Image: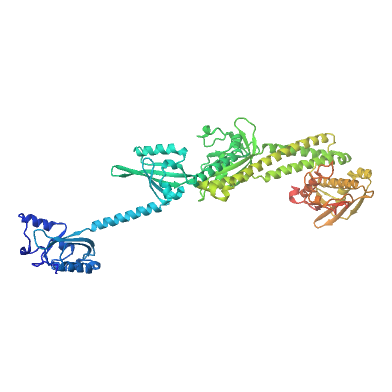
Amino acid sequence: MNRNASASRAAGPAQSATPTLPADAALARALLYSAPVAIYHSDIQGNLTYANPEYWRIFDLSPEQSTDDWAQGVHPEDRARMQSTWADFCRRPRPMQFEYRTLSRDGAVRFISEQVAPAHGACGFVGTISDFTDLVTARGDLRKAGTLFRNTFDQAPIGIAYSDRNGALLRFNAACCTLLGFAADDLAAKSVGELTHAEDVALAAAQLERLWDGEIPFVDIEKRYRRKDGSYLWVRTTTALVHEDSNTECSVEYLRDISQRKELSAALLQQQTLLKAVISELPLALLACDVAGNITHYNHAAVELYRIKSRDASASDPYPLEVDVFLPDGVTPVPRDERPLARALHGETINHIELVVAPHDSAPPRTTSSNACRLVGPDGQTLGAVAVIQDTTERKQQDMELERVHKELMTASRQAGMAEVATNVLHNVGNILNSVNISASLVAERLRQSKAAGVSRLAALLLEQGAQVGQFMTDDERGKRVPEYLAALGEQLLADQRLALEELAALRDHLEHIKDTVAMQQSYAKLCGVTEVVEVVDLVEDSLRLNAGAFARHGVTLRREFEAVAPITVDKHKVLQILVNLVRNAKYACDESGRSDKFITLRIENVAHGVRISVIDNGVGIPAENMGRLFSHGFTTRLSGHGFGLHSGALAAQELGGTLRAESDGPGCGAAFILDLPLVPPASARA
């Protein structure tokens, strides 16, 4: 039962044990010695009588070993099994086939297939031992590749579908079913054409036809697929042909859901369109430049203000502004590198810089107010600059006209006779002039509160996003609010414009009224607006004298409660304006009360750092709900009142560095108006 040769331990058997060879013995010997498989012969008892050299190689036997050492070359895990199998063969020789592994001295593992069969024409059995390691490795690789393909196909996060030339689905993965909402059995009965939206069928079919005809290597298109619930899903499909040798088996299509991207793109387009429309129609000029100072963006208002040529004509012109720019004097030119955009590009923040723009086409110059800032990218790099320019020409002209008329009125009021001033100029012209000042203050305050600078900050915010502006506009809460903010800003600016125009129109009416009134009065002998050291008692007495006739006519009794106070430095004409208005209002309050005992008390007293003048009446009083509105522009309870007097008085007191306030216990309880003035006006008032 030994698996060894009986004659020798050499690579070949002894001549006496060798079976009868064919006539061409040399050829037979060469075949045995050169065979790529191990060949051996055993007698009927299972004893080896011959083994060729490949046998020795397979079992990694050295020349010093014998064939009986074959088990040492068998892998340890298979050795006992093979020894038992060979022992069984030796006990009962018969045709057998078995597989096992060998382990060489260098650690290499080989897969072996051995067959033993009866020897024809000789006694015993002949066996062959084949090394099929390469086949096992190939099978393993093939199994791994198959597993990898199945896992990739089944677990891919995108849809994968195979179809024939007619579009019938041959195979598809789970992601494809999930994407389209079909069960696998339901989807198997569909074709690509059935699932494609009717509007996309023609394009998809034409592209697939070109693919199958070999005109293009693949098809990459966006189209809509119908889901099981009837809804349509936007997908991007990439389709290629599957070849085996020279035959085309089918096509494979990869499907990616792009519905969200389509929705975001549509939303982004809507937002961009809205943003473009809002900016284009803003009543403010907007200019933007790149890092080299070249104009890159502008809106319709900028085209009108700067006479910018059409985009086609200005495409090659990096600075298409057809105007000259001057300082507010309208004479000193401003070089291009000193204008707001250029200065902002160098890091300056420009706020409300007044410049004059003179078009080259001889149109009248325009006065402007500019705001500008540098645009900085997410990494801190300079991207350019943006400027927002407001055309203030009309406002400037109205301010100049207002100032001119104001000076005329102040001069006229000084030169008029005191009695006539009391009944005409100081009351009529004074109140109307107050309304003019109030309207001008409102316009100026509204312009100071203008949200125009917000456009610059918004533009900087958008450019700061760089290439991510689309994602910013759709995902970021600030970006989503941009259109709403711009719409509100546009409405606010238009509202400011309407208010300014309304106030300016009212100013024109008042100025005409003032001009008519002034024409009937004598001119003042002195200039106004000069601060003087005056006695407070003299100011109060002047105000009383100007209304003396009215007191007598309406039966009003005056009471004087004067403390000794220091003289004050003040513009006495403003104080007189306030006191005349307060005394006249007190007279009206007493007259409207219907009382027979009508009293007005004038009180002068010292207070910290100044003096206090109080005008107290026992007239109709002031309801509590009106107390908060007394000094509001336009508020009055008299049918013939303008609602300007108290408002202008409060403003005048503020200009003098003092305050004007009211007190009343309610209707029928009279009222007190209290004017506090400093001994010396603040620096701003003196200036």
Against 9, is 457 above or below?
above
**What's the residue at 91%, 52% (across, down)?**
560
Residue 535 screen position, x and y as percent? 85, 50
| Color encoding of the figure | rainbow
Against 600, is 494 above or below?
above
Left or right for 5, reference 340: left
Q: Nearer the viewer, residue 491 or 335?
A: 491
Figure label count: 0
Left or right for 40, reference 469: left
Q: Is residue 579 visible?
A: yes
Residue 603 screen position, x and y as percent? 88, 53
Quadrant including the N terminus: bottom left
Left or right for 246, reference 538: left
Residue 596 screen position, x and y as percent? 95, 48
Left or right for 314, reference 670: left
Q: Is residue 404 visible?
A: no
Residue 93, located in which quarter of the rendered image?
bottom left
Q: Nearer the viewer, residue 655 or 673?
A: 673
Residue 484, located in which quarter of the rendered image?
top right
Q: Nearer the viewer, residue 406 or 332?
A: 406
Residue 423 screen position, x and y as percent? 87, 40
